[in-house]
Amino acid sequence: MEKLKWIKIENFRAFKKAEISDFGDINVFIGKNNTGKSTLLESIYLNLAQNNKDLLGIYPFRAIFSRRGISGIGRVRYSEIDDSEDVITSIVYYLFHSINIDKEELNKLMSSINSNLNEFELNAYFGEFPEDILKIFFREYVGYYSGDRDDIQPQIIISDGNNDILFSVVEKLPRNEIIYRIHSKSFLRFHIKRQNVLMVDEYIMRLRTLHSSPMFSFIKRIERYSKIDKEHLSKFLSDQLNTEIVDIIPKIFDIFLLLKDNKQMPVSLLGDGTKMALSYYYALSLEDTYVLLEEPENHLHPKLMDKIIDLIINSSQKNQIFITTHNLEFLQKILEKSYEKNINLKVFAFENLVDGIPNIEVYECDEANAALNKIGVDLR
């Protein structure tokens, strides 16, 4: 597996321009809120996924918008908003580092997320659209294309450099509505490639199919790629639940833990900390994967945090890991254990974000240990 070494980002979300390099096997992004940590994590996610599905079978843009609490599809009536540009503004502001939504400027909006592994672009079109994009657009919405359709009028389309439609805002004249939707012409393919990238955060607790629990969906999707030692996992859960776990049994709607007294406990009823730890366990059991963790310390008891850090350290020998955190204790523990085991860990301290340019201080593991008091001031 080739590691991510550097990434260049232009005009995407919080970043007007950023270049980050010298990534290690474990990369920890720290800093105050609104300094660009999550923007960098999402940039890495998009660059590595390349508009394919991630390892869970999720389209990255849907995951990103869902984790931010934004619906990927919706209808907004004109009577509910002052102007249709309200919807356009929201989308443009979310995806592009732009303070200008003048119609003449919209067609000039572009963002790029390039790395040593991939190139990725987003382009905004307003009013006049390339012919190939219109063909995709009309096939998605009305099933066929003709050049003289007048009942559907696109207002803005955002696509990648290959003209795959990623986000559309559309005005349906007969219904007098604005419809916005994340989609891609990838839906028309019979086979969608899954990329070896996975982002794990609290969003996965809302990931579910029609009939199954979120943890069931997560575990069943990921276990086909991970090599789980059931005996080790049973001990991991037994220590956490203070009861002996005999077996882990998948059923139709949920995963059940078989206890020593033959009672069964559904995983969906476990505490949030235990469920998050279980999701990290599966994610960190993968091989040759880029694993992205957003604030993994959330919901974790300090002893459970220790176990997750051990999993991260061991996993970094087979994967490349990217983490955001605000927790000084988490940072201190992962630095100490990485230093003891000679792990290639880097700390990226986001000091501030001025006019879309992040100021990032990079530390090697031993340097971060030595500078922990200074770093701790920023985290506290």
Image (cartoon, grey):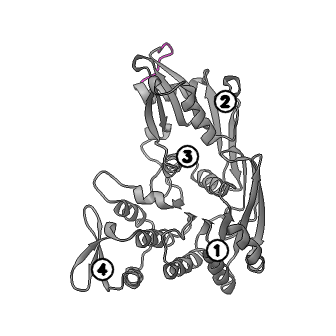
Residue at image coords 68%, 68%:
379
Is residue 202 in view?
Answer: yes
Relative to the observer, which residue lies in front, 78 or 265? 78
Amino acid at circle 1 = Leu
- Do callouts 3 and 1 mark residues in contact (Cβ within 8 Å)? no
Q: Label 3 is placed on what type of residue?
A: Asn
Whether the residues at callouts 2 and 4 have beta carbons within 8 Å, the answer is no
Question: Residue 53's x, y, as percent?
Answer: 49, 51
Q: What crowding class fits label 1: few (fewer than 14 Cα within 10 Å), some (14-19), or many (20 or more)?
A: some
Decide whether residue 145 is among the magenta residues.
yes
Query: Considering depth in this image, is 209 or 230 the residue closer to the camera?
Result: 209
Q: Amino acid at mark 4?
A: Asp
Q: Position of residue 1 (x, y in %)?
A: 61, 66
Q: Which residues are magenta?
A: 144-149
Tell me the residue that label 1 is attached to.
328
Q: Is residue 149 left or right of residue 264?
A: right
Tag on residue 101? 2
Q: Which mark is residue 343?
A: none
Viewer-side label of 2, 3: 2
In terms of sequence position, does the residue under pointer 2 or pointer 3 come before the other?
3
Residue 67 lies left or right of residue 358; in this view the side is left
Q: Which mark is residue 247?
A: 4
Asked if residue 323 shows in the view, the reply is no
Q: Where does label 3 land, which residue?
A: 51
Residue 352 or residue 170, whichever sits in front:
352
Precedes in sequence: disc 4 or disc 3: 3
Say which element carries label 4: strand
Q: Which three-letter amino acid code belongs to the residue tagged 2?
A: Ile
Tag 4 or tag 2, which sits nearer the N-term?
Answer: 2
Label 2 packing within 10 angstroms: few (<14), some (14-19), many (20+): some
Q: Height in image: 147 above or below 129? A: above
